[in-house]
Image (tube, grey):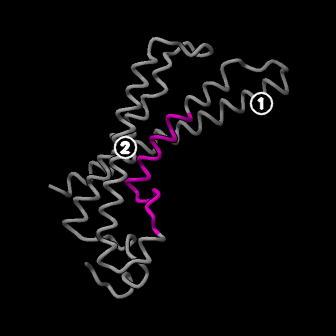
């Protein structure tokens, strides 16, 4: 069953990464159009900068969730690797719990911001202002899901090789 869950989370992470990549490409096209309009046409599109920032908010936050799944988020690696092997296991748990706590705050406060500002409109885009805060909640939910999966793996499989210090990987020790 865990294999199926891991496979589903891998697919979800891949979809999120594709979504973030499409966002980056869209932002590059929009900023390119903005530069073209400003310097060639001498008529800057009024919507381009705000839309690029709007899209950037989405793909950065979704990409951050993918970072948690792929284990390239900030994880106090230097500090953790300097500790003895047994402490590394505990630190890995603390890191995932802290990451989940931060993600929970993203959900709660991001959705509160979305709800509070939904009736306002982004002037240049005509979209509800609250729409720019939805990715906080979505990213937070993905981060909690991915962190919970890492915790389950931690307790069922032990520390992954990339989470251990160099001396542990070479010797093959597990906690």
Residue at x-position 27% and y-position 79%: 174
Going by the image, does 26 lie left or right of 97?
right
The quadrant where residue 1 appears: bottom left
In the rendered view, would you say 24 is above or below 157? above
Going by the image, does 48 lie left or right of 17?
right
In magenta, the rendered stretch is: 56-77
Residue at x-position 37% and y-position 39%: 105
The residue pinned by badge 2 equals 103
State the separation of the CA atoms marked 1 and 2: 36 Å
Q: Would residue 128 be counted in the magenta stretch?
A: no
Residue at x-position 41% and y-position 59%: 71
Name the secondary structure under disc 2.
helix
* Furthest residue toward bottom: 171
Instruction: Confirm or deny contact between disc 1 and disc 2 (CB under 8 A).
Output: no
The quadrant where residue 126 appears: top right
Q: Would residue 72 be counted in the magenta stretch?
A: yes
In the rendered view, would you say 2 is above or below 135? below
Q: Nearer the viewer, mark 1 or mark 2?
A: 2
The residue pinned by badge 1 equals 35
Q: Earlier in the sequence, mark 1 or mark 2?
A: 1
């Amino acid at each position: 069953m865990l294999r199926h869950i891991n496979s589903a989370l891998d697919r979800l992470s891949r979809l999120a990464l594709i979504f973030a990549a499409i966002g980056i490409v869209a932002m590059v096209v929009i900023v390119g159009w903005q530069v073209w309009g400003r310097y060639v046409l001498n008529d800057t599109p009024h919507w381009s900068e705000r839309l690029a920032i709007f899209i950037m908010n989405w793909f950065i936050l979704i990409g951050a969730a993918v970072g948690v799944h792929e284990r390239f988020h900030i994880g106090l690696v230097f500090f953790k690797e300097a500790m003895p092997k047994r402490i590394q296991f505990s630190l890995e748990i603390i890191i995932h719990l802290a990451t989940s706590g931060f993600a929970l705050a993203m959900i709660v406060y991001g959705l509160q911001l979305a709800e509070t500002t939904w009736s306002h409109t982004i002037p240049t885009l005509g979209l509800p202002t609250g729409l720019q805060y939805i990715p906080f909640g979505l990213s937070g939910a993905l981060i909690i899901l991915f962190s919970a999966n890492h915790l389950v793996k931690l307790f069922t499989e032990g520390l992954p090789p990339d989470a251990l210090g160099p001396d542990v990987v070479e010797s093959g020790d597990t906690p």
